[in-house]
Amino acid sequence: MATATMPRRPTKARKYQTKILIGGQWRDSVSGKTFKTIDPSTEEVITEIAMGDAADIDLAVKAARKTFDDRKGVWRKMDARDRGRLMHRLADLIEEHIDELAELETLDNGKPIAESRNVDLPLVIDCFRYYAGWADKIQGQVVPIRGNYLCYTKKEPVGVAGQIIPWNFPLLMAAWKWGPALAAGCVSVLKPASSTALTALRLGELAMEAGYPAGVVNVVPGRGSVAGDALAKHPGVDKIAFTGSTEVGYGLMKICSETLKRLTFELGGKSPNVIFADADLDTAVQGSMLGLFFNQGQCCCAGSRLFVEDKAHDEFVEKLSKKVESRKVGDPFDPDTEQGPQVDKNQYDTIMSYIEKGNKEGAKCVTGGERLGDKGFFIKPTIFDNVTDNMTIAREEIFGPVLSVLKFRDIDEVIDRGNANEYGLAAAVWTRDIGKAHAIADGMRAGTVWVNCYDVFDAAAPFGGFKKSGFGRELGEKGLDSYTEMKTVTISLA
Ligand code: NAD
Ligand code: MN
């Protein structure tokens, strides 16, 4: 995966954008307060970032509102094709700065540089280019109604979008939010996660360089319970797009009901990954490993419940453990590293407590189960075998490098057990039997089903959850739709 130009760890002298972007201006927080962001592989402070609160959110929403509501202004009057060109320009700028952005992502988040450089960043660029292509293709229909009328529909931008994103794919989540919003003609107030705000701020700089009019994109870092909360409450915001935990989702939905905001929620998951004995086991081992351990296990769609058909169980677990034990865990700036540290101390502690619960409740830890080293939030890739459906590690989202292996006998049983969970984000199946593949694809109540693959993402393919994994879809045409309102115009021809 390593490329010749693999970026290095930045020196201490390196300067970062740490201010708040409001109405095209970079400013300190109204309160003057800042917060520290940490390099999770060294536990050292990288820099201090302006900490936005309700006052900053208010300024940002007003700036966004002003840009959106100005009917004679640069944004409303811009031709859709030029909006697309701006997005292409931003994509080009990201590509020009791909090494720098990957370096910043790895520094702040801890993900391996080979992944930020060769997975995250290419997906970010692709997302902007994909939606750039949509900007001038958002159109309505002529509707044949009764009587002497011309009736047509058009799709208009929803307005000011408050966008709250998590820390696991900081830039990619920003792209999933800005891509459809900007293509649709919305304006954004983006609230990045506080542990990983640096790349969103740099993205804000690039958007300004690309020529976005002031107020179209605003970036306000700050605490979720303060800045995120203020964004959800603000009457000037038309829509909240939130990616994060289901728990926070409950609260946000309540708050947003008071102003009847449009909502799209991408929440948690506990996705079943089903291995039939007739699968190509080596491919399934590789795919299942990545399906859980990719990104330090910090994926909403992680295949964290691995159901293995009983006759293949022993062989599969042995192969999988060997593979997992050979994973290279360590310095995320080493181009060969496959697993870096967890994003912060909080996540590290939560994951360790789940490992403790796994042991206590009688699961068998076949590999890992402990911290790696004594500096940085590194956890050895961990597999629990003999897991049963009622154990905590089989029910709750761990969001770390901890895999639960469960046994099953037949297909109806595994569909029932796979669905016996409050989440419904993704599912996967590995088999050579197309009938079984279809049965799983059909039977699992999940927004995405992968067959003989895992984590295949594309800007064109809708993604989102059933049940408590959220509602609405991101990516694809469906993702764009959630940033538009439909207007029906009826003209009397009499
Ligand atoms: P989180 O819910 O704690 O935080 C997500 C974002 O919401 C952050 O920006 C945070 O500051 C903000 N926030 C926190 N409390 C808030 C509040 N009270 N009001 C408004 N905003 C608030 O989640 P996290 O720990 O950052 O991310 C991990 C979770 O996100 C996992 O559950 C994971 O499954 C989920 N996730 C889902 C998807 C998806 O597409 N479905 C993608 C990535 C992550
Ligand atoms: Mn950080």
Image (spheres, rainbow, N blue to C red):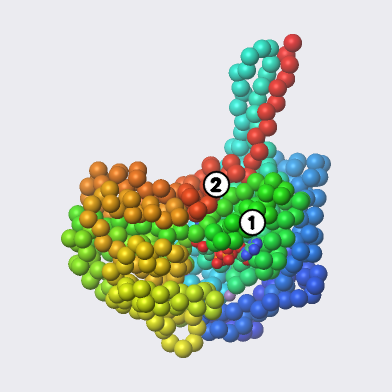
Q: Nearer the viewer, mark 1 or mark 2?
A: 1
Asked if the residue at label 1 sits under 8 Å from ligand 1, the reply is: yes
* Rendered location of residue 14, percent (x, y): 64, 80
**What's under tag 1, amino acid-wise?**
Leu
Question: What is the CA distance from the residue labelled 1 to the residue labelled 2?
Answer: 15 Å
Residue in the picture at 53% in, 52% down? 470
Q: Which amino acid, mark 2?
A: Gly
- Could one spot residue 77 in this view of the protein? yes
Mark nearer the N terminus (1 vs 2): 1
Q: Position of residue 237 (x, y in %)?
A: 72, 51
Foreground residue, 422 or 13?
Answer: 422
Ligand 1, seen in the image, is in the quarter at bottom right
x and y percentages locating residue 305 in the rendered image: 36, 62
Q: Which residue is rendered at x = 41% and y = 68% of the image?
A: 392
Q: Which residue shows up at 72% across the image and 71% down it?
A: 51
Q: Quadrant of residue 335?
A: bottom left
In the picture, the quarter occupied by the N terminus is bottom left
Residue 63 occupies quadrant: bottom right
Q: Taking 299 as reference, is 494 left or right?
A: right
Residue located beneath label 1 in the image = 252
List x then y, in percent, for residue 180: 60, 48
Residue labelled with disc 2: 472
Asked if residue 328 lies left or right of residue 99, the reply is left
